[in-house]
Each structure stands twice: as structure tokens, then as C-alpha cells.
Image (cartoon, rainbow, N blue to C red):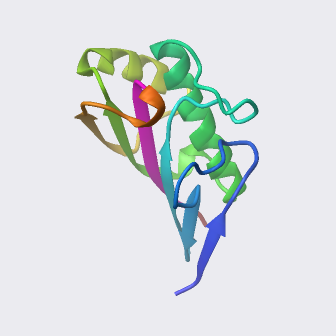
Amino acid sequence: MNKSIIQTADAPAAIGTYSQAVRVDLTVYMSGQIGLDPTSMQMVDGIDAQIHQVFKNLAAVATAAGGSLADVVKLNVFLTDLGHFPKVNEIMADYFSQPYPARAAVGVSALPRDALVEADAVMVTG
């Protein structure tokens, strides 16, 4: 097994005991991203801005790993209000094109830093 850690200043620094992503051979496991601005480390305001920031953060990690969001094969989305799911679908179309990755959407009671949305991903490169 060839394991390496992915780290980029273009996405928020890890705020716990985890890595932004871990590559094992051609597969990259990206940690959950919330709507933190990587420069200020402050949460962006509102659900639309948070969804956009989540996908920007995932894209930055994907780029650091040598890929792009087009290489994502699995996406997990966590929402504190499933009523925001249509917004996720709408905004996701700005970042992903067909064929879309497999995806799960889960309603949760709370997220770190009072985020409204979080997403993690699995990407395959090469």
C-alpha cells in the first residue's frame, strides 16, 4: 500500500486530529469540508455561500491531490436542514457534470462550527 497525506493552504487547515485528504494508491479520501474560508478560517454566511465554499474547498483538495472534482466517484453531503437539499442539487451543478458521482445526503442535528452543510468525497485519479 502506498499511502500519502494531501495538504493544501487553498482549503481550510484541519481543525482536529485528521488530514485534509489521504491518498492510497490511486484513491484519495477527502475529509469533510464545511463553509470555512481558507484565508480567514471564518464561516461564510448563509446556506448558498456555505454550499459554494464546501465545493470550492473540496476542489482545492482535489487539485492538491492531482485531480479535480470530475474525478470524484462518491460524495457524502450532510445537512442540518434537509429542506436545503434542492439548493445543494442546484449549486452542485456548477461544480460537477455528468456522469455525476454516487452520492448520499444525510440530515444531521449539528455540524462543527455551526455549519449548515458539510461534504466529504472519494476521488480516483490516474
Position of residue 105 measured from the top left corner of the image (x, y, whole percent):
27, 35
For residue 67, side relative to residue 111 (left or right): right
Position of residue 46 measured from the top left corner of the image (x, y, whole percent):
50, 12
Identity of the residue drawn at 53% across and 54% down: 16
Position of residue 7 measured from the top left corner of the image (x, y, whole percent):
69, 58
User: Viewer-proximal residue, 44 or 10?
Assistant: 44
Position of residue 39 measured from the top left corner of the image (x, y, whole percent):
76, 33
In the picture, the quarter occupied by the C terminus is bottom right
Identity of the residue drawn at 57% across and 60% down: 19
Q: Is residue 96 above or below residue 50?
A: below
Q: Is residue 78 above or below residue 116?
A: below
For residue 114, side relative to residue 1 (left or right): left
Magenta span: chief secondary structure: strand
Q: Is residue 99 visible?
A: no
User: Viewer-proximal residue, 23 or 26?
Assistant: 23
Q: Is residue 37 above or below residue 90?
A: below
Per the image, is 122 magenta?
A: yes
Identity of the residue drawn at 33% across and 35% down: 78
Res 107 → quadrant: top left
Magenta extent: 115-124
Q: Is residue 82 visible?
A: yes
> How many circles with numbers are drawn on the protein?
0
Per the image, is 67 magenta?
A: no
